[in-house]
Image (cartoon, rainbow, N blue to C red):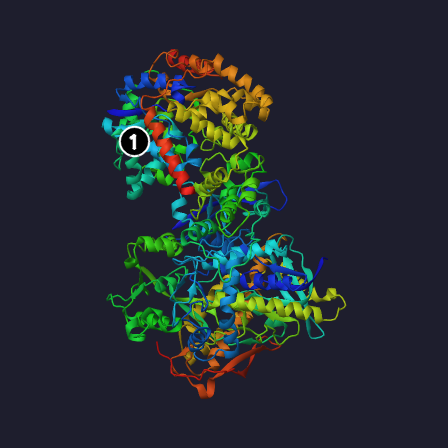
Amino acid sequence: MEIRLKVRRQEAQSEYSSYSDYTVDMPEGATMLDALLQVRDYDDGSLALRYSCRSSICGSCAMRVNGRARLACKTKAVDMANGDEPIVVEPLGNMPVVKDLVTDMDVHWDKVRQITPWVENSGPEPEREHLVTHEVMLDVSNALSCIQCGACVSDCPVLEVDTSFIGPAAFAKAYRFVGDPRDDTTKERLQGLSATQGGIWDCTRCNMCVEVCPKDIRPMDRIMQLREKAVAAGVKENIGVRHGNSFAGSVRRLGRLDEIRLLPESVGMFNVPRLLSELPGAWRLFRAGKLPWQSAIPFMHKPIPGIKHVQRLYDQARNQKKEQAK
Amino acid sequence: MAVYTHDVLVVGAGLAGMRAAIEAARNGADVALVTKLHPMRSHSGAAQGGINAALGEEDSWESHAFDTVKGSDYLADQDAVEILTREAPANIIELERMGTTFSRVEDGRIAQRPFGGAGFPRTCFIADITGQAILHVVYEQVMKLGITVYEEYFCTSLIVEDGEVRGVVAMPLITGDLVIMQGKAVIMATGGLGRVYAPTTNAIACTGDGMAIAYMAGAPLQDMEFMQFHPTTLKDSGVLMTEGARGEGGHLLNSLGERFMEKYAPNKFELASRDVVSRGEQTEIEEGRGIDGCVLLDVRHLGEEKINERLWQIRELAIDLTNTDMVHEPVKVRPGAHYAMGGIKTNIDCASVMPGLFAAGECANVSVHGSNRLGGNSLLETIVFGRRAGESAARYSKEAASKAPVSEASLARDHTRIQQLVEGAGNSGERPAVIRGELGRMMREDVGIFRTKEQLESALAKVVELKERYQTVRLEDTGKVFNLDLLSIFELGGMLDIAHTMVAGALAREESRGAHTRRDFPERDDEKWMKHTIAHREEDGSPRLEYGDVTMTRWEPEVRTY
Amino acid sequence: MKYAFWPGCVSKGACPELYESMILISAKLGIELEEMYDGNCTGAGVISEHEPKLADMLNARNFAIAQKMGHDLVNICSTCQGVQSMVQEKLDRDEEYRAEINAQLAEEGLEYKPGLTIKNFMWVLVEDYGLDKLKEQVVRPLDGLRCGPFYGCYILRPSRILGMEEHPERDDYLEQIIEAVGGTAVDYEGKDKCCGFPILTNNRKNSLTQAGTHIGSAKDQGADCLVTPCPLCHLNLDAQQPSAAEVIQRELNVPIIHLPQLIGLALGIDPKLLRMNRHVVGTQAVLDKVLAAVEA
């Protein structure tokens, strides 16, 4: 099987990059890593890339293939081939390039170090192992099976615009501690993770990390679990939580979303500077006729016919939650 | 030229290396890890099935020790095995307290699964990502202790002055400029050498570097002829399918649909020790009862839920690499080169015969595995002997009087070597991949599960030939940053040296023991061969073999059946 | 062709032009919509953050209402689609959980039975209606109109729950529709990324930088407008565009068109009826181009 590759090349500390074209003959089941190693071994010894286990466990060979971060050893070349077009291979995004497909992953490891990446336990040590349930260990192990390959870091759109964002992989790592009953700093962790700058509430829930993750860690779901745990632990003093409460409150009241009250309720009714900064936007909406007239007057939204059933579901869900908490 | 100085240098940051570094730090040493990969990329992370310890009330360390000695075909040093098994439970508990997420049983205690060659279910696990999960946790501790890690630094040689190991020469991939790293003690923890075979379960990084540079510097390698072939590896890639698959109840079938292990191990079936199962498979394949050169690993009867919970990684690998979903069909597997029983000879405190050089993990041979390792004992070895190595090296570094700084001349040899390669770039020599490819094929064909004098003699001639051809190997990349071409040439030189010891040891050992099976000498011969092979490197690069006694404490050799 | 029609909250709130244009074009195309007047908000992924089970119950309620009506469910919002698909996957996979949720719905006489077909209008158009048939209805081909597709995250990801295996081209439908009505699909960085809307309140700067960057990259590729099947994206890309322009400090002024509006223009519907005037970023340039093409 003939595989055509177009690989981005870049020298160290150079802004300039170019593409090299290669054609290799590979067996049908060859992975992208097999193809690149074939190039490195026999065509061009100067091609730099990381690799090691070739069984998707060491996390070395994440790179962008056809525009999306993937693990080269888990990606079949035949699946990437697209007619006459060559397969485009590029380094991970959101981090500096060291050479060719090798990037500086410190961007990610620095974030990991920020989240206090070890179990903290100041209590007395148990006689033997801690007695914990299988289910909770399994849940934490699932998060722990993240191989730190950086695919999600590469493609996270929030990191593209804000380098202070902790990022999907480091949040998944954080979940591993928050979800671990042997750690006794859960609340402090959740407070730290809820920080205004770069914290869990800055995730846009775009699912990009879920999509590109080669190990099905679903980092975004971990972030959502962290949010749920933060709320449950009473870490609520932030816009993200108020946004959720306002949203849920509106649905309980009307069966639908009342987008007009969302903003003031989220940023805080008394957050005058922020509210003032939003006024031009609101005025633009109103002028464009995009605010239905009744929206301008609070309490004029009509609830849906079955609102009492919606409210019943709310109350049932919340009662169940309370009972579980007990 | 940069010079870095620490009390203890640990080369390699897999489980043995990191565990050693943690212990050295706890003992007050200024310790640094020097690794050619990032710690989380280490091949310890690929260990799937588990880690052994006699935790159960009805189990005992003696029983674990006996299984290990029997599994070793009585070549293991029994004092070392006693330490391994006696210290196992406390080490597992410590890992748990560090945060390892061991799978549990109902009452919240650590769960254990049956494994090959074991008389009791004593393998602790985290699904089938045991190595990776422990690697995470041990690296967490390295971060917690603030241990210095020199990531992506490749060690090119040991620095030996006045007969003592005083540090290493290393090449940071990021700059390509050699640096001197001074240390009063050096711990080798570089892992395995599987890449001398092709295919192998081992990562591409497993090129036996630590063994090679220690051997080059004068440290002898022990029992190198014993290479473990794992019974369940994928056909073309050689990727590992955990023993846990059989531990959980998976079957091995031949082309007739028979559970053929009944013939070879009527009591233990698939859970005999690995050498026995691999020989069984190979015999079936050679006698025409294989399928595409493989046998079948069948776990369908375990059901999707159990497979997803306990064998999720291998299910995914089989889908990715062979388009086989183990929930619905058996996967083709065959024996594949997996683990080097041999390594740098050490005593039970992990000290090599060279002052200042210690070793732990797969690159070492403290001889707990003898001629065949039991599944679940290698992770255990990294933790138990990693800890001991850290402690010993820290103690040694304190006792060592302060020394004059290492002279710059110590990196001259490697520097010259690089100069020559760069200057010779574009010559007519062969590319390293060509020589590496031939080495791997030769080792697979002639130094495999079954061996004969003819095969081994031919292998010996081939190694010598490849070494000769290596002298004019051709470098292509003359750049400095991340020069993997140069790295692969250094690795290949070491691999050829190591392969030489393996072939020579295998040719000399005229008996069958554990993983070393000679068709021309099918029986174990305790009278002549109950001894360790010790290989020293001669000036011309060829090995000189000596033999050493096996330490026996309480278990007399018996006929070995499963 | 008859569907249970879930308009979503935004088309009945801040984006009434979406609702109105949808009603107009469905009539013209002969797609019958029976509106789910009693449906409730899907939670947009927000409720599920705090109260996953509540979000599942609310969505199951919608599914059951559609089933009671006896039709497939069609929505006009990428976010609704994503949330609905996510919940449906969970309910269809886990019988026990489904029973638990259904027990709560029983009081209202509702029950969700697995296997409801839930489709965004964009999918309906390509898969049920057919692009050839759509082409036949075009009376005002949008020749020369360069449209940047903007999908919205939830209609693309996670792909495993969005039927991408069965319909691998679902990530290309917007382009196909744009071309079917005579326009030119513009490829640009950001067409499948996040508009930033979900964090508008929490981190305005990040949110608007995302919106502004994507609009800018489409503009750099020569797009006359963006077309989106998601009203939440529309809110950030259109209503917030002047603010986004300030944040990223570049002029944008790129009209953001709802998918039904684009179809409506091609079907010859009066732009006023499509409420093309109800946008923050004026759409006149788009209309000029479309009408000029017809006159020429």
Residue B399 lies, in percent from the top left, at 71, 71
Residue C225 in view (yes/no)? no
Per the image, label 1 sits on a secondary structure element best described as helix
> Is residue A30 or residue C251 the one in the foreground?
C251
> Is residue B473 or residue A245 the one in the foreground?
A245
The chain to which mark 1 is attached is C
Residue B536 lies, in percent from the top left, at 58, 78
Residue C21 lies, in percent from the top left, at 36, 17
B240 up-or-down from A33: above or below:
below
Mark 1 neighbour density, 10 Å: few (under 14) some (14–19) many (20 or more): many
- Work out which residue is located at the far right of the displayed protein and give it: B404
Residue A5 in view (yes/no)? yes
Q: In the image, is A116 to the left or to the right of C24?
A: right
Residue A326 lies, in percent from the top left, at 42, 43
Q: In the image, is C192 to the left or to the right of B6?
A: left
- Work out which residue is located at the far bottom of the displayed protein and give it: B527
Picture mark count: 1
Question: Where is mark 1, residue-wise?
Answer: C63
Corner quadrant of residue A323: top left
Residue drawn at the location 41% of the way across and 33% of the way down: C154
Amino acid type at circle 1 is Phe
> Is residue A145 or residue B164 the one in the foreground?
A145
A183 up-or-down from C18: above or below:
below
Q: In the image, is C293 to the left or to the right of C201?
A: left
Residue drawn at the location 37% of the way across and 32% of the way down: A315
